[in-house]
Image (cartoon, rainbow, N blue to C red):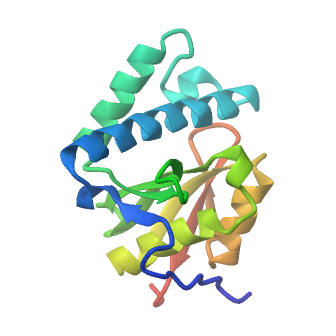
């Protein structure tokens, strides 16, 4: 299978949030944390338990605080997609993975009305281009056919079942192990 690569233009809406002013950076983080909550709800609605997820729906404030803590503790970095009005419409979060000495994709999200426009591909490609690592890992929900297709189109292969029910680990090795 051929790996998908999307050419990125300089002003195609892909922005590393570390390049933003503090004010814009904080506004973008607000979008990201709310999108993380939407991802969480999507997973819960499709059979992943709150216990396995390690978060609970009854308190969005606690969920966001826990997400912020995870991002800070693991030095999670983010790239966002913005539309022509400078509004965030998607993001990818990633961190260094000490086990593989590669990159772990924490989350990938695109607003519903912006899906099927190659935004997720652009975000994933931006991480690969920016980090230039050999190994990439991600957990993908077994029920999420669109995500499985996206990761597989980049050359990710099923690696293992996750300790989280209904999730599988996918791995991309660019230059051989």
Task: Count how many numbered circles sit on residues in the image.
Answer: 0
Lateral position of residue 100 relative to residue 41, left or right? left
Lateral position of residue 6 relative to residue 105, left or right? right
Q: Nearer the viewer, residue 158 or 81?
A: 81
Asked if residue 158 can be seen in this view, the reply is no
Instruction: Tell me the quadrant of the picture where the C terminus can be found.
Output: bottom left
Give residue 149's position: percent from left, percent from top: 75, 66
Q: Nearer the viewer, residue 19 or 101?
A: 19
- Determine the residue positioned at 53% across, 17% down: 56
Looking at the image, the residue that sits furthest to the front is: 85
- Determine the residue positioned at 69% across, 72% down: 152
Up the image or down, 53 lies above or below 117; here it is above
Looking at the image, the residue that sits furthest to the top is: 58
Asked if residue 36 can be seen in this view, the reply is yes
Give residue 128's position: percent from left, percent from top: 44, 76
Q: Quadrant of residue 100?
A: bottom left
Up the image or down, 111 lies above or below 137; here it is above
Up the image or down, 133 lies above or below 81; here it is below
Instruction: Tell me the quadrant of the picture where the N terminus can be found.
Output: bottom right
Up the image or down, 24 lies above or below 84; here it is above
Q: Quadrant of residue 47?
A: top right
- Determine the residue positioned at 61% across, 72% down: 156
Give residue 27's position: percent from left, percent from top: 35, 38
Q: Nearer the viewer, residue 10 or 132?
A: 10
Q: Quadrant of residue 7?
A: bottom right
């Amino acid at each position: 299978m051929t790996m998908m690569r999307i050419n990125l233009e300089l002003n195609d809406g892909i922005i590393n949030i570390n390049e933003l002013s503090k004010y814009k950076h904080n506004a973008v983080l607000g979008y990201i944390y709310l999108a993380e909550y939407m991802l969480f709800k999507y997973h819960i609605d499709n059979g992943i338990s709150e216990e396995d997820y390690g978060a609970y729906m009854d308190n969005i404030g606690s969920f966001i605080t826990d997400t912020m803590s995870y991002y800070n503790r693991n030095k999670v970095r983010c790239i966002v997609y913005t539309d022509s009005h400078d509004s965030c419409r998607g993001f990818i979060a990633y961190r260094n993975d000490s086990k593989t000495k590669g990159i772990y994709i924490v989350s990938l999200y695109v607003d519903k009305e912006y899906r099927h426009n190659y935004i997720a591909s652009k975000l994933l490609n931006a991480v690969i281009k920016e980090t230039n690592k050999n190994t990439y890992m991600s957990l993908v929900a077994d029920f999420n056919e669109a995500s499985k297709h996206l990761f597989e189109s980049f050359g990710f292969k099923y690696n293992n079942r996750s300790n989280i029910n209904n999730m599988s680990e996918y791995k991309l090795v660019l230059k051989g192990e």
